[in-house]
Amino acid sequence: MRNLKLLTATAVALAMAWAGCDTAPSGRKAALPPSRGLPYELALLIPKSLYTGELHDTLEAVLRGSTPGLPQHEPMFRVNVVYPDGHIAAGGFGGNHIAPWRTFRLRMLVDTAAQVRLGVARDAVARPQVEVVATAPTPQALATLIGSERQRITDILVEAELEHDATALRRKHSTTTADALRQLTADGGGRRVCVPPALRATKVGRHFLWTGTNLNDRDQNFLYYAFAWDGRPLTTDSLVAKRDSVLRENIPGSQPGQWMQTARIDGRPLVLARTRTIYNKERLELRGLWELRAGALGGPFVALASIDSIRRRVEVVEGFVYSPHSPKRPLIRQMEAALRTFE
C-alpha cells in the first residue's frame, strides 16, 4: 500500500473532539478497549442533510461498490449510516446514540468544514481501529474529494481489515500448510505463511505447493510456485502466461483436456493488476477469475508476485475460492489476508 499522509493537526483535533478524551484521572492515557464490528463493517458518521443530498450517490458508489475481482456484485463494505448531532468542526458529532459506534473497527467521518481535507487516524478510541475523515466547504466539494480519492479511501479501510485478519491467522493457522511450504523452500532458507486452519489437503510439485479445504462449497485454496527470474520487470501478460502454464501442469481436472486456467473473454484474461508495496516490499498484485477448461467450475483468485533478486527467482503466492452457493467476498478476503503473512 502506498504511503499515506497522516491527518494534519487540525484534522486530528476534529477526530479527537468527536472521540472524546480517553485519559485516566492521573493524565496517563487509558488502555484502549478492543474494537468491534463484523468483517468489513463500517460506521459512516455524517449529517443527515449531507447523506440524503447530492453526496449520497458518491458515498454509495465508493463504500457499497462491488468488491473487485468477483464474478457478481458483493459490496465492498457493510455500511451503518449514523446521523450525529452537530458538526465535527464545532466539536460536535455527539449524542447518546453515537456511543455504540465509537469503538467500531472501521469508521468514516464526513462533514462540511472550511478546508478540504482527507486524513486517517488509527486507534483513536479502540484497538485496532482506523478512521477516515473527509471535510470540504460544500457538498459538491465533498463529492469531488471522495470521488477522486475513492481508491485511497477503500485501500485504507480494506488494508486495515486485511491486517486484522492476518494478525488472527498468525495466532491460529494451518500447520500442515506451514510445514509443507517450509520444507519445499528449504533451499532458500524456508518460507512461512499462515493460512486458515482448515486448509489441510496438500499437493506438492516441483517448486509448487497447493493446499485446500477440499470442500464442495466455501472451498479455500492456497498456491505457492516459483520460477526463474530473467532480470526484467514483472508484467501482467508474463505473469498470467506463467500462471496458466503452472496450473495446467499441476491442477488438472477429472477428465482429459481439463485443467485450471485464468478465465478469458475474447482472449483477454479477466484480471486486474497493480503494483503494491506491502511490508516495504514491492509486489505485483493480480486479482480476477479462474475457470476449469472444458468444465463448469470457476471462481475468484488473488495473487501476489515478488522478485527474489538474490536467488534470481520470482515467487508467487495465491489464494483462490470455489463457492458456487455462498458469498465469495469473505472467503477471498481472508485468503488475501493470508498472503500478507508470506515471508
Image (tube, rainbow, N blue to C red):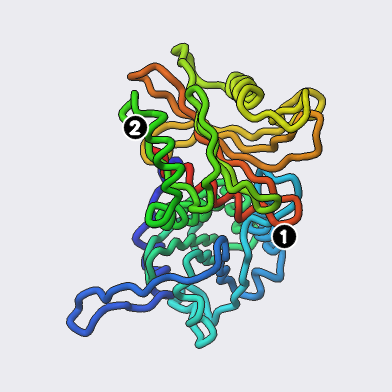
Q: Which of 330 and 105 is in front in this view?
A: 330
Give the CA distance from mark 2 to mark 1: 49 Å
Q: Residue at x 60, y 56 (%)?
A: 330
Quarter of the picture holding the C terminus = top left
Residue occupied by mark 1: 57
Mark 2 neighbour class, 10 Å CA radius: few under 14, some 14 to 19, many 20 or more: some
Q: Give the foreground label among 2 and 1.
A: 2
- The quarter holding residue 235 reads top right
- Residue 126's x, y, as percent? 38, 70
- Disc tally is 2
Give the labeled residue for mark 2: 190
Is there CB contact under 8 Å for labels 2 and 1?
Answer: no
Q: Nearer the viewer, residue 219 or 137?
A: 219
Q: Residues within 10 Å of mark 1 (few under 14, many from 20)?
A: few
**Residue ranking furthest to the left:** 26
Whole-percent x and y of residue 36?
A: 47, 71
In percent of the image, x 43 and y 24: which residue is there? 307
Image side of residue 171 versus residue 133, left or right: left
Q: Is residue 238 above or below residue 263?
A: above
The answer, for residue 192, to whether it is visible in the render is yes
For image coordinates 66% across by 24% down, the residue present is 248
The amino acid pointed to by label 1 is Asp
Residue at 82 percent of width and 25 percent of height: 266
Q: Can residue 117 be seen in this view?
A: no
Q: Residue 133 versus residue 178: which sits nearer the camera?
A: 178
Question: The residue under label 2 is which amino acid type?
Answer: Gly
User: Secondary structure under badge 2?
Assistant: loop
Above or below for 186 versus 229: below
- For mark 1, give the secondary structure: helix
Residue 238: x and y in percent read 59, 19
Q: Is residue 281 above or below residue 324?
A: above
